[in-house]
């Protein structure tokens, strides 16, 4: 034996428990880490939205304030006087502008400037800038075909002149005007310019606060352009603009607020966005993910540390649990090793459980072998003592016989009356040919068990396998009365029914008389054997009793009557087959009532008489009635019914031979005609058994039977075979498609043709043509 390693199962157990705990801890840690990441991103998004909401609030406040201001200015009488004047009065314009400017700028310090345009005079008046400053926004309004949005912020650089130099100046411009259905261009326009610092400085302050984290906030207008004073990082702005546009194109159903992640320069960013619908702008905030994940990295380190500590504790717990579980197994293995011979385990084992399993299996095999040998010994001895009961007279004292019956488990009582039942398998020649030696033993064993179990319901009994075609039951029967014969016969008939249903084999039962002691069993066995021969007259599956054979045994006649034999000769001479059948039945009925030996002699005598009668009638005897074979055929049969069938069929064959020859010639003509007709008309798609039978004026059933018996081939197979042969010839002789060939040979279904062709030639039509053409080239 190849020794397994020390405590191999303990090590396996320790490893499995450790791995299980490791997997649990790792999975839980991973779940915690992943959820922490998701929670962190969610929290960061919420924080970013709060910042964007602050900017959004400022923008909406600015938008509402300036929109209200535009509406009030548009309705102001001073503004209206300047905006719709028909004649220019510069003094009045200056006074009204000063009045408007003083009232607006005093209440709204973030107002940069104000422009009023008079279309009648085509003149723009400015407050807060040179009086006649040319505003390009007005030019864009009147020179283009489209109208600019009213009361929506337009971010632009109006530029200013400082010490002779032009410097950028960024403002949010709001326009207010009215148009009519007749004229889409307004008669007057008010432009309010708001200082960009009000919003951009606020965003800049937020960006300065978050610069250490790498955060940035940007504003994008409806056209996708940044509202920028030129201080932003152009590279990031270009990347953000392109990626945000791509994201919106890929997610048209996305909400007006949300977030997504993108990479720039190999660094991942969290991008949060929010739309300011009132101003028609979008706020974008970028945040480096790595900066955001600094806290999660610290959490990951903590999780790893906790996991490591948990694993160490788990390993310690695994050792404790494994030792506790393994202790009884180890003790059992040591006990088995000490008490079990080492030679008992001759196979390789890998651990303690395998060792115990191997030891257990070998122990059970040895125990089963012991019990089997013990049972076989007892069965052999039981069969021996039962056989002795049948074979000889012996005298054993009562106590010793009782001890023997108990030890051998013989169910027969020590005192009483006994009978013998001989069970003889029918059609033994066929039985020998159908079954192997092992199967025959099994069937005889089953026969004993079935018959013994059914009979045991009323009569204690024991069965003995007598080999060959018979088994035996020794039955304990009542000491008085004769009704037991009928009861036992009924039980054996039930056993016959069950046995034939399960094994498709029948048997004949012979029940002897009864003996008052075991010493008379030998004579009963001989009686049962003699009675079983009467199966010849009574037939297969019969139950033979002395009462049933009383008429045959007492019959003093030695054979059948001479009158019946003379009558049979006359019928043979005249060729009257019907009368021949009747007289033959009468002869066998008369022989069935004879003593067995006389009946057998009479059968042989009758066979000789039949052969002699055929010879005198100048009728050639059939092969079954030849002198060389008739005796052997008769002696092989077990019942008179079988012998009668042999004689009768022999007589029929003898007298019907000439008729059979004529029928055979006619059938041959029919077969040739059908074959030739199919070869000539195989192209006809309607060709079938029914069409051929109709043409020949024969029923389809008769035609099919004649052709099948003569050729072992159905007409449908003949038609398909001819068509496939022709198709194979066309495949290699003509350049035709498979569809054309199918039509030429009379098959309407191309799929069916492929199935038939492949079944016959083991390849497709295309493969067949290629192979044959290749063979011709070679």
Image (tube, rainbow, N blue to C red):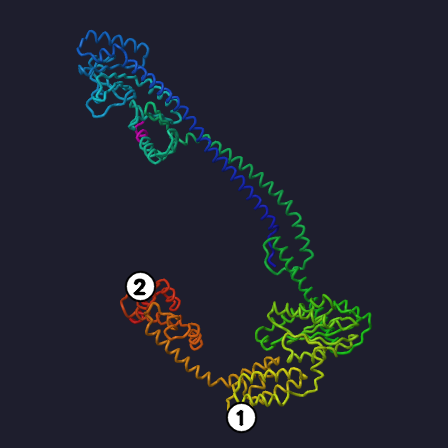
Whether residue 356 is situated above or below residue 550 in the rendered picture: above
Residue for point 43% across, 28% down = 44
Give the image location of residue 50, x and y in percent. Answer: 41, 24
Q: Is residue 314 magenta?
A: no
Residue for point 62% across, 43% down = 321
Image quadrant where one finds the C terminus: bottom left
Of pointers 2 and 1, the one earlier in the residue sequence: 1
What separation in Å lies between label 2 and label 1 (alpha carbons)? 68 Å
Whether residue 233 is situated above or below residue 470 in the rendered picture: above
Give the image location of residue 238, x and y in percent. Answer: 30, 30
Image quadrant where one finds the N terminus: bottom right
In the picture, measured across the screen, residue 307 lies left or right of residue 592, that is left
Do we see residue 731 in this rendering? Answer: no
Q: Which residues are magenta?
A: 233-238
Whether residue 613 is situated above or below residue 730 in the rendered picture: below
Q: Is residue 236 magenta?
A: yes
The label number, if any, that marks residue 616 in the structure image: 1
* Image quadrant assignment for residue 379: bottom right
């Amino acid at each position: 034996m190849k020794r397994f390693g020390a405590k191999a199962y303990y090590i396996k157990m320790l490893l499995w428990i450790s791995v299980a705990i490791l997997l649990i801890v790792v999975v839980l840690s991973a779940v915690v880490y992943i959820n922490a990441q998701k929670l962190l991103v969610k929290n960061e998004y919420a924080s970013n939205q709060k910042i964007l909401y602050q900017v959004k609030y400022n923008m909406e406040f600015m938008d509402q304030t300036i929109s209200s201001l535009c509406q009030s200015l548009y309705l102001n009488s001073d503004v209206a006087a300047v905006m719709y004047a028909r004649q220019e009065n510069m003094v009045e314009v200056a006074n009204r502008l000063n009045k408007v400017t003083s009232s607006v700028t005093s209440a709204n310090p973030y107002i940069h400037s104000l422009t009023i345009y008079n279309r009648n005079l085509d003149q723009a008046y400015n407050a807060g800038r040179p009086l006649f400053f040319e505003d390009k926004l007005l030019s864009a309004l009147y020179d283009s075909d489209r109208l600019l949005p009213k009361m929506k912020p337009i971010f632009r650089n109006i530029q200013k002149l400082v010490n002779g130099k032009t410097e950028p100046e960024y403002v949010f411009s709001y326009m207010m005007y009215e148009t009519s259905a007749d004229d889409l261009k307004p008669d007057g326009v008010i432009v309010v310019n708001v200082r960009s610092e009000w919003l951009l400085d606020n965003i800049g302050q937020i960006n300065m606060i978050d610069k250490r984290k790498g955060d940035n906030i940007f504003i994008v207008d409806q056209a996708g352009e940044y509202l920028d004073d030129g201080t932003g990082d152009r590279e990031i702005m270009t990347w953000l603009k392109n990626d945000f546009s791509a994201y919106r194109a890929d997610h048209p159903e996305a909400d007006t607020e949300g977030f997504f992640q993108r990479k720039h320069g190999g660094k991942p960013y969290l991008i949060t966005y929010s739309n300011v619908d009132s101003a028609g702008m979008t706020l974008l905030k970028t945040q480096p993910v790595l900066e955001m994940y600094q806290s999660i990295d610290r959490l990951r380190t903590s999780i790893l540390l906790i996991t490591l500590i948990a694993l160490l504790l788990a390993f310690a717990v695994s050792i404790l649990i494994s030792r506790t579980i393994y202790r009884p197994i180890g003790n059992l293995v040591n006990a088995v090793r000490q008490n079990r011979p080492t030679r008992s385990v001759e196979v390789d084992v890998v651990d303690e459980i395998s060792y115990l399993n191997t030891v257990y299996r070998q122990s059970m095999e040895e125990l089963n072998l012991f019990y089997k040998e013990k049972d076989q010994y007892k069965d052999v001895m039981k069969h021996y003592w039962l056989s002795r009961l049948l074979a000889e007279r012996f005298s054993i004292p009562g106590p010793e016989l009782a001890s023997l019956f108990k030890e051998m488990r013989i169910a027969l009582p020590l005192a009483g009356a006994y009978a013998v039942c001989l069970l003889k398998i029918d059609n033994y020649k066929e039985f020998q040919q159908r079954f192997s030696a092992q199967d025959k033993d099994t069937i005889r064993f089953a026969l004993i068990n079935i018959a013994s179990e059914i009979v045991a319901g009323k009569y204690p009994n024991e069965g003995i396998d007598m080999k060959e075609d018979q088994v035996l039951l020794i039955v304990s029967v009542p000491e008085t009365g004769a009704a037991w014969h009928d009861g036992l016969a009924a039980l054996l008939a039930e056993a016959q029914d069950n046995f034939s249903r399960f094994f498709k084999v029948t048997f004949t039962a012979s029940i002897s008389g009864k003996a008052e002691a075991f010493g008379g069993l030998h004579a009963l066995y001989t009686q049962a054997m003699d009675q079983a021969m009467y199966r010849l007259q009574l037939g297969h599956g019969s139950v033979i009793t002395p009462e049933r054979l009383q008429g045959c045994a007492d019959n003093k006649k030695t054979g059948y009557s001479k009158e019946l034999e003379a009558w049979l000769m006359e019928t043979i001479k005249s060729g009257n087959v019907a009368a021949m059948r009747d007289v033959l039945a009468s002869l066998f009925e008369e022989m069935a009532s004879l003593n067995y030996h006389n009946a057998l002699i009479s059968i042989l005598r009758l066979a000789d008489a039949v052969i002699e009668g055929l010879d005198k009638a100048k009728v050639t005897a059939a092969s079954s009635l030849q002198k060389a074979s008739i005796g052997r055929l008769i002696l092989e049969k077990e019942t008179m019914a079988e012998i009668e069938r042999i004689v009768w069929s022999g007589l029929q064959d003898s007298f019907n031979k000439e008729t059979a020859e004529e029928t055979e010639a006619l059938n041959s003509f029919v077969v040739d005609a059908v074959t030739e007709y199919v070869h000539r008309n195989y192209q006809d798609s309607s060709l079938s058994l029914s069409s051929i039978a109709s043409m020949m004026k024969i029923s389809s059933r008769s035609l099919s039977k004649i052709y099948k018996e003569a050729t072992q081939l159905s007409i449908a197979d003949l038609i398909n075979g001819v068509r496939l042969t022709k198709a194979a010839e066309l495949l290699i002789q003509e350049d035709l498609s498979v569809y054309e060939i199918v039509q030429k040979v009379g098959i309407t279904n191309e799929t069916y043709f492929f199935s038939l062709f492949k079944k016959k030639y083991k390849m497709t039509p295309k493969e067949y043509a290629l192979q044959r053409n290749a063979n011709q080239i070679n």
